Image (tube, helix red, strand yellow):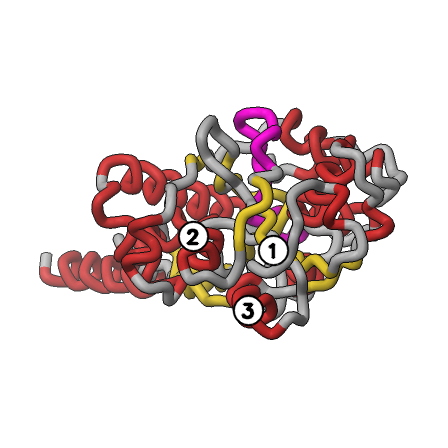
Amino acid sequence: MNRILVALSVAAIGVAVASPARALDKVLIGYFGSDATLAAFIAKDQGYFEAHGIDATVQQMSGNSTAVPVAIAADSVQVAVTSFPTLVLAAENGIDVRILAGTTVSSPGLHVSALVVRPELDVKTAKDVEGKTVGVPGINNFIHVLMVKWLGDNGADPAKVHFVEAPMPQMADLLHSGQIDAATPVEPITTRLLGGGAGKLVSYYTDGLPVGTSAYILLVGGAYASAHPATVKALRASLDEGLAYYRTHPEEIDVILAKYLHFPIEILRASPKAQYDNQITRDQVAFWIDAMKKQKLTSRDLDPASLIVP
């Protein structure tokens, strides 16, 4: 009997040793100075990533989001926020990145972006923007694409506007110094620029977007997604829980945003809040492919569904 008990004990130990607790998957999530990655902020703060087996580092990135696909393809960052046009251009150039999740979406009454000019300039219409230097977060990113569309739709020649890259946190300083004549911020930068007197509002030029249009997305490498399907599933589940928390605890959101965006809490409290949707549809992707074809930024017949992780 004792021999049997000893044998069973050894077998039990052997099973325990052979089946250790699975280590958490390390994932670096990159973001920039907007509220688009709010679900990731919440998932990190509330422990949702860890609960789903992910050791997530949520880190602010320098530069602009146009460099994201290269960073993801090099696996220096596993997930990062960028704009739809950046994704389309990456696909155009054969960089294998896919959409992991959506972020903010356009909705009635929400101003996605604004055209803000230096206070001393007499700019009232799209035509007045000709000859001016306009700062955009990235050349050929979603703000640049939409600004070009707005100019053309309103009688101006986009070719007569000088676009330069201007990181949103620096837009106020660039306006003050006269290095740019106009800026194209999103919230909460828009409220900060207007409230601080760095510029005056010309137009909420994105208000004509179809309701539900998605501008920012979270990207992941195609090869990474194929090799780590369980991690992708866990990331999406964590983001969904983060979004659910946002909807049930709206009073806590400004504190979370202040922590990650390093903005004064009063600016965040005064800023309108976006609507969010983690789900991305084929039609949302097709909207941007079509817009960029019209501007001759892409020539490939891309399949919208192929750009979304299944």
**Helix, strand or loop at mark 3:** helix
Q: Amino acid at mark 3?
A: Gln
Residue 228: give x, y in percent of width and height: 55, 51
Residue that mark 3 sits on? 170
What's drawn in magenta, residue-wise?
Answer: 206-225
Q: Amino acid at mark 2?
A: Thr
Residue that mark 2 sits on? 191
Q: Which mark is residue 105?
A: none
Image point (67%, 52%), residue name: 223
Query: Is 39 in front, or is 166?
Result: 166
Residue that mark 1 sits on? 117
Is residue 191 shown in magenta?
A: no
In the rendered image, which quarter is residue 287 located in?
Answer: top right
Residue 60: give x, y in percent of width and height: 48, 67
Question: Alpha carbon of mark 2 to alpha carbon of mark 3: how far?
Answer: 14 Å
**Helix, strand or loop at mark 1:** strand
Q: Amino acid at mark 1?
A: Val
